């Protein structure tokens, strides 16, 4: 709260002199002190004091009190116990069955707007502020809005209690009355009961990027602004509170004089001023000039800030002279909390400009710094090591640098992105992390193969479904397809038919989930549930976005976020490995390298859910295999900026989004020799016919004719298997296994 309102610089003597005057009122017009001190006076008049024995007093706060009143009463009780060595006779609320039970003669200290008439009596001349007064046998500490009780209690403790503290006693003036007006406050409603304020959010948020998307939801921050507006309108008798964006005309500056409730990152300098006072995990609201700024460094904490303001409105609500509820906040009001799920004890990065936080699943989050340098990144690595962090792995892809560290508490994955330039720091508690393996010992019994499954397209199934047979006879399954038709059984039967292990056990060393769409995840979930006793699953490798990130993306999925994956890890005992860009994970004889995750989008909004895919690749026998999942324009654009053709060059590539994703520029950088095209023949023929200029048909046609391409393998017509590395990029290298479904 605004401690500047309190007269901390006054000596106790001067304060007592002032308070001995007769009832100094502090209404909106002010009041004259009828008692004056002669200019010729050479000595201060004697101030009569009253000794308060705390054991004779009950400490009373309102029943169903706002949190501010509870906190103030608790603070006083704690201070009395610690500093005076005694306890109040009673510490309770003001509940009585009927008013006749209230004892007017009882010695009580009243905190907040209690049902004792003395609480109202002390406030009768106060427009907006707080009062400390002795009324009869009651000591009243009250305020026009409960948010000011913090200031009032601090003043009471520091001015009266602590300077005069004795063994179970303290002193106050016999005629105690002190009122502090809260000047320079902002008020929600004007005299005509109309809103002085407009709620403002960032211009451009209230839409999605794709003009073809039929669902015009609002982005997460806009939705939280709308919720705040609706809550405030309900609490203040449906008074209309305008809603707008931070747009200003060219060469114009935002109007500092306008009364605004600013939600989230905007062009308002007051918001930036507020954010600069916050730690990465903090959020809240503050009054700065004529603005009530509501925010945090991430979309998630911005939402928490709006919820905090909503829940705190009663602390700032008063009833005006006309009997209308209104809201007032004093200048300098600041209410801030910390999101405890994020551990911010990791070393800070010093070599750039902190721009914000991207929230991840569970307790994971990403810090984003622009203006970074290679030297700054190296200095941060040295800082981590000096703080006791151990290096788990490091990597370089093109001009981008990656390093993963850990200590007993946290994993820190930091990487330098050259094209921006920026540093991203992803961190998560070690209790929630399965560090990607750097080695995975095994005994070879077979060669490595890659199988693309022929899904039950006639039954409406589609998606990505790949099986990699590893040298020890275990498998990597990538995605798995949807669940239409008989493909749950077909996937299991394919694993049985491909199994080379002498014990006959189906052992899946890793199941990789590119993203949460039905056609990539659902068959995985059903196979694991239906065949959990027949299949051993070591780990699931994934990296998916939190709800607040994909909130307004088209067609978001939520299989992992709704708890399905966590439940799976418990029932099967598998590990969950969250893979971040630049990290590698060793699975038997394959080292899988992550090229892209949804974490690389920030601060761009995730408009298209497919761009939340995780892109991976692996090298085997001098050949490189890249799996793109369903990435579309934004993810493709980021990869084109992060990497050059030399870095991305691949021998075998899965075509993005079954032929509906990727970009011509990205495909040219990859320069693939073999295309794994996960769709049916009819769709493939239409996509590559070259007769349509719509959708992705021109991209697919260009890809199919790209000079680097020697072989295209389409998914239907039987399950297609190639040995890795491929000896030749011809159809002779492809074997076909017919599905078992009828």
Image: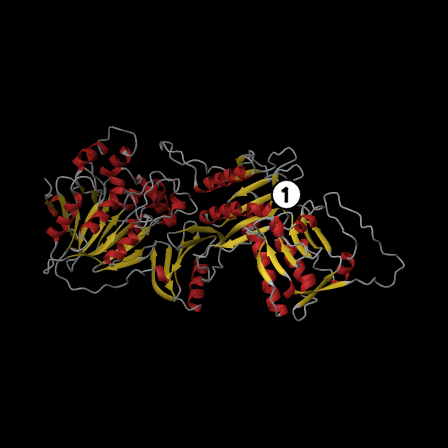
Q: Is residue 533 above or below residue 219?
A: below
**Judging from the image, what secondary structure is the residue with disc 1 in?**
strand
Horizontal side of 145 relative to 614 (left or right) equals right
Q: Position of residue 474 (x, y in %)?
A: 17, 57
Horizontal side of 468 relative to 513 (left or right) equals left
Residue 664: image quadrant is top left
Q: Position of residue 309 (x, y in %)?
A: 53, 46
Q: Residue furthest right?
A: 40
Residue topped by disc 1: 186
The answer to whether residue 246 is seen in the rendering is: no
Question: What is the basis of the colouring in this image?
Answer: secondary structure
Q: Position of residue 170 (x, y in %)?
A: 69, 66
Q: Nearer the viewer, residue 652 or 281?
A: 281
Q: Is residue 740 above or below residue 85?
A: above
Horizontal side of 165 relative to 602 (left or right) equals right
Give the residue drawn at x 19%, y 54%. Answer: 532
Q: Is residue 328 above or below residue 140?
A: above
Q: Residue furthest front?
A: 100
How many numbered tags mark residues here?
1
The quadrant in which the C terminus is found is top left
The answer to whether residue 693 is seen in the rendering is: yes
Give the residue drawn at x 17%, y 56%. Answer: 533
10 Å neighbourhood of mark 1: few (<14), some, or many (≥20)? many
Q: Position of residue 206 (x, y in %)?
A: 45, 36
Q: Nearer the viewer, residue 648 or 82?
A: 82
Give the residue drawn at x 47%, y 49%. Answer: 301
């Amino acid at each position: 709260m605004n401690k500047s309102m309190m007269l901390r610089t006054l000596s106790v003597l001067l304060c007592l002199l002032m308070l001995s005057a007769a009832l100094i009122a502090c209404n909106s017009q002010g009041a004259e002190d009828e008692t004056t001190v002669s200019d010729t006076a050479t000595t201060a008049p004697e101030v009569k004091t009253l000794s308060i024995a705390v054991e004779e007093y009950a400490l009373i706060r309102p029943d169903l009190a706002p949190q501010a009143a509870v906190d103030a009463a608790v603070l006083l009780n704690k201070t009395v116990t610690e500093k005076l060595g005694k306890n109040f006779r009673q510490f309770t609320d003001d509940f009585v069955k009927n008013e006749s039970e209230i004892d007017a003669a009882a010695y009580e200290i009243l905190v907040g707007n209690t049902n004792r008439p003395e609480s109202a009596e002390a406030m009768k001349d106060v427009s907006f502020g707080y009062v400390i007064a002795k009324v009869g046998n009651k000591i009243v500490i009250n305020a026009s809005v409960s948010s000011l009780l913090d200031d009032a209690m601090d003043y009471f403790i520091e001015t009266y209690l602590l300077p005069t503290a004795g063994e179970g006693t303290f002193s106050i003036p016999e005629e105690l009355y002190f009122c502090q007006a809260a000047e320079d406050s902002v008020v929600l409603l004007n005299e005509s009961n109309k809103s002085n304020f407009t709620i403002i959010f960032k211009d451009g948020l209230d839409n999605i990027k794709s003009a073809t998307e039929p669902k015009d939801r609002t982005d997460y921050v806009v939705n939280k602004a709308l919720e705040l507006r609706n809550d405030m309108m309900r609490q203040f008798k449906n008074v209309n509170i305008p809603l707008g964006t931070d747009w200003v005309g060219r060469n114009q500056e935002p109007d500092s004089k306008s009364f605004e409730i600013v939600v989230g990152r905007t062009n308002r300098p007051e918001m930036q001023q507020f954010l600069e006072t916050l730690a990465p995990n903090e959020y809240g609201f503050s009054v700065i000039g004529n603005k009530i700024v509501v925010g945090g460094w991430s979309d998630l904490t911005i939402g928490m800030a709006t919820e905090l303001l909503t829940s705190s409105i009663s602390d700032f609500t008063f009833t005006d002279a006309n009997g209308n509820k209104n809201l007032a906040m004093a200048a300098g009001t600041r209410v801030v909390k910390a999101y405890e799920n994020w551990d911010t004890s990791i070393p800070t990065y010093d070599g750039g400009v902190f721009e914000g936080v991207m929230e991840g699943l569970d307790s994971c989050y990403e810090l984003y710094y622009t203006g970074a340098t290679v030297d700054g990144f190296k200095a941060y690595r040295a800082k981590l090591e000096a703080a006791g962090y151990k290096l788990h792995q490091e990597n370089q892809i093109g001009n981008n640098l990656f390093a993963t560290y850990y200590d007993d508490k946290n994993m820190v994955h930091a990487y330098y992105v050259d094209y921006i330039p920026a540093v991203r720091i992803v961190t998560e508690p070690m209790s929630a992390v399965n560090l990607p393996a750097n080695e995975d010992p095994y005994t070879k019994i077979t060669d490595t193969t890659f199988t693309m499954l022929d899904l039950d397209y006639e039954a409406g199934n589609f998606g990505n479904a790949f099986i990699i047979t590893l040298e020890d006879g275990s498998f990597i399954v990538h995605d798995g397809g949807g669940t239409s038709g008989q493909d749950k059984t077909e996937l299991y039967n394919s694993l049985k038919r491909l199994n080379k292990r002498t014990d006959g056990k189906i052992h899946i060393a890793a199941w990789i989930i590119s993203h949460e769409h039905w056609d990539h995840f659902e068959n995985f979930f059903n196979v694991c549930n239906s065949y959990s006793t027949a299949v051993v699953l070591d780990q699931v490798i994934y990296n998916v976005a939190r709800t607040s990130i994909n909130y307004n993306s088209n067609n978001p999925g939520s299989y992992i976020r709704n708890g399905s994956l966590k439940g799976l890890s418990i029932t099967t005992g598998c590990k969950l490995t969250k893979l971040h860009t630049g990290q590698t994970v060793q699975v038997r004889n394959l080292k899988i390298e992550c090229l892209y995750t949804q974490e690389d989008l920030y601060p761009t909004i995730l408009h298209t859910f497919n761009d939340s895919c995780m892109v991976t690749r692996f090298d085997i026998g001098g050949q490189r295999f890249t799996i793109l999942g369903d990435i579309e324009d934004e993810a493709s654009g980021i990869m084109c900026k992060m990497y050059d053709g030399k870095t991305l060059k691949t021998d075998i590539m899965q075509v993005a989004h079954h032929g509906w994703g990727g970009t011509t520029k990205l495909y040219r950088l990859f320069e693939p020799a073999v295309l794994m095209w996960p769709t049916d023949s009819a769709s493939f023929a239409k996509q590559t016919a070259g007769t349509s200029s719509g959708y992705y048909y021109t991209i697919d046609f260009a890809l199919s004719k790209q000079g680097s391409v020697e072989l295209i393998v389409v998914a239907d017509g039987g399950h297609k298997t190639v040995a890795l590395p491929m000896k030749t990029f011809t159809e002779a290298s492809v074997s076909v296994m017919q599905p078992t479904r009828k």
